[in-house]
Amino acid sequence: MAQTGHHPSGSDCAPGATEPHWAAGVEGQRRADLGNGYYRNPVLAGDHPDPSILKDGEVYYKVSSSFIYYPGLVVWESRDLVNWAPVGPALREFVGSVFAPDLVKHEGRYYIYFPALNMPQTDGAASSPPPSKRRPLTTYVVHADRIAGPWSDPVDVEIYDGIDPGHVVGEDGKRYLFMSGGGLVPISDDGLKRTAPTERVYDGWKYPDDWIVEGFALEGPKLLRRDGWFYLFAAEGGTAGPPTSHMVVVARSRSVRGPWENCPHNPIVRTATIREPWWSRGHGTPVEGPQGDWWLVYHGYENGFRTLGRQMLLEPMAWTAEGWPEAKGGDLSKPIRKPRAGKPDVHGMAFSGDFSMEAFGARLAFFKPDSNYFDRVHVDGGTLVLAGQGTGPAGASPLLMDAGDRSYEVSVGLELRGAALGGLLLFYDGRFFCGLASNASRFRSYKGGVEPLFVPALPAIGPNLFLRLVNDANVASFFYSHDGRTWTKHSSFEVSGYNHNVADGFLSLRPAIFAAGDGSVAFHSLRYTASV
């Protein structure tokens, strides 16, 4: 499958053009590898917040916060830290909004530790999580003998007083989880339960009072043991808000209980001005490269494209003579030499094509689903039949694609069955979405989560139709067709405000299909094409 290349900031239109040029067959994630020994950030475009990286022999694995997208905790793999492809989801059971995870391997077994926030259903979704999952905040672990699974059901680790667990084996050989706020929690040898109360062992690094940040927010601890030291990489400053919020700070200690000495040149990563190409850079994981060099993986918002969520960034890291890490990426808008001795592989995945059950996770994810969400799904000969839920998009638990391109188009065929309402959207959450849908009686359009007063309603064109979305750098246009070849434009919307700073939730704006009402919708001929 072909992939997209990174293009410079600004318009994607040729001089004098009225719409972008669409390249046939280009799909999936923006490709970071430039093919000449260099790469350009992001290494994973789209919403990949809070990346946790595990080096396992010659292979690297990654998981990120999956929040209320399910199946969640999708594992990705790479052999060069630049080209990444999905392995599959590790979490299928709905347990709430999944925050910053930590992927580790201990004594031959894989573990993913993660906090889940039980979010009340406020947008018309069918039901809340089951009663056993209704604690406000719980740390869970899933585990597996193989990275591809099968993964266990989520296990309650019995930690309810922090987020962002970071696993470490202490100098005593025992296992611990570092938590937000500098907490340290001993856990059992099997890694499944806490064994003692939380102990606060680190107070963070105090940044200057005049820095413009969202808040102190000591979080995202990632632990590394090197040359007799424990190194603690942590986030501060808040994950969004002002572009200059968020950062990576480092401290070290001979013991997991401290005392912790802060790096003399903290923070090692931070967005200093609004003019930089990447905003709110932070939440870093250090990782050794294929040939012993060092790298730092973290997330950031792309300047002008908060709608894409927090994308995954990579920059080289070095160690000073005094044993402190330094980020060496410089201007992240420029190409950077790839890790030495890495083995390039497949990057991204195709959104287009037939539907299959294997597509759920990386390619398609439900938004805030009911606990039995797969009961709605039937795949038949490459066609997805989705039973209706709720009365409209907000309560329908739409199926979303994590598109990482600044501009793209999506088209899909629909067969409306019974009294179902089916459509194509750009969807942030149950309050912020826009798009086009139809049932047996008429078309419906949506803007800002409601049907606008002054967009003309149109009669339905029958149970079989095609819908098309063109997102041109946050200007979205929607089209309909009888045959998938001749298109009629219905409406256009500006969507740059559909992002976390406006809507909260730490999510991203994603193409979506949905089925609501009584009946079902059969989706076919899904096509995603990125602009070049």
Image (cartoon, rainbow, N blue to C red):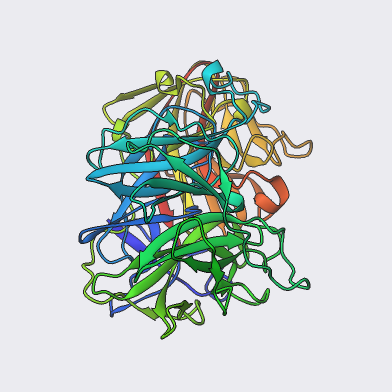
Where does residue 260 sit, x and y in percent of width and height? 54, 65
Quadrant where the N terminus is found in the figure = bottom left
Query: Which quadrant of the figure has residue 219?
Result: bottom right
In the visual, does 91 lie left or right of 271? left
Nearer-the-camera pick, 291 or 202: 202
Q: Is residue 496 above or below residue 91?
A: below
Extreme residue toward the bottom, this view? 321
Extreme residue toward the front, this view? 172
Query: Which quadrant of the figure has residue 206?
Result: bottom right
Q: Is residue 508 visible?
A: no
Where does residue 370 sit, x and y in percent of width and height? 51, 22
- Residue drawn at x 45%, y 62% is 531
Q: Is residue 190 above or below residue 334?
A: above
Where does residue 291 sit, x and y in percent of width and height? 23, 74
Nearer-the-camera pick, 145 or 205: 205
In the visual, does 225 lie left or right of 194? left
Q: Is residue 110 above or below residue 461?
A: below
Q: Is residue 449 visible?
A: yes
Nearer-the-camera pick, 497 or 479: 497
Quadrant where the C terminus is found in the figure = bottom left
- Residue drawn at x 29%, y 43% is 110
- Residue drawn at x 75%, y 37% is 452
